[in-house]
Amino acid sequence: MDEIRVRLPIRLGQFVKLASLADSGAQARELIEDGEITVNDAVETHRGHRLADGDVVALDGITVRVRATDD
């Protein structure tokens, strides 16, 4: 599982794009609204969902863990 270091707070839509799970913000929005993205094994359909340190975001078997950074 990959880990992506981010400055918190970060919203799901931003993270999906940053983690390269989507090529664009529009694609990220579609994936989220269609229920294709999970956060901690639960489907999340709100792109504004705020992620926390340690959350696991997944799409089609690709999993990425959110890691908070101070810089």
Image (spheres, rainbow, N blue to C red):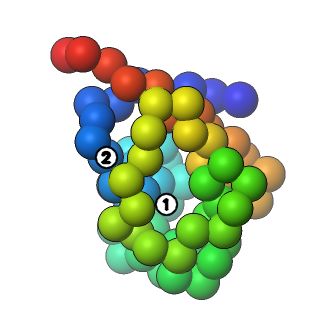
Q: Quadrant of residue 28?
A: bottom left
Can I make out residue 24 in this image? no
Q: Is residue 69 shown above or below 10?
A: above
Tell me where residue 11 appears, x and y as whole percent: 34, 55
Q: Quadrant of residue 71?
A: top left
Tell me where residue 27 appears, x and y as whole percent: 45, 73
- Residue at left offset 54%, top offset 54%: 21
Q: Is residue 34 shown above or below 49?
A: below
View extreme (left): residue: 71
Residue type, label 1? Ala
Q: Quadrant of residue 55?
A: top right
For mark 2, does the 10 Å Cα neighbourhood hold few (<14), some (14 to 19), or many (20 or more) residues? some
- Residue at left offset 38%, top offset 24%: 68
For mark 1, does the 10 Å Cα neighbourhood hold few (<14), some (14 to 19), or many (20 or more) residues? some
- Where is mark 1, residue-wise? 22
Q: Nearer the viewer, residue 64 or 48?
A: 48
Left or right relative to 4: residue 34: right
Can I make out residue 31 in this image? yes
Left or right relative to 15: residue 20: right
- Residue at left offset 40%, top offset 62%: 49
Q: Is residue 37 shown above or below 46?
A: above
Please give the label number shown on residue 10. 2
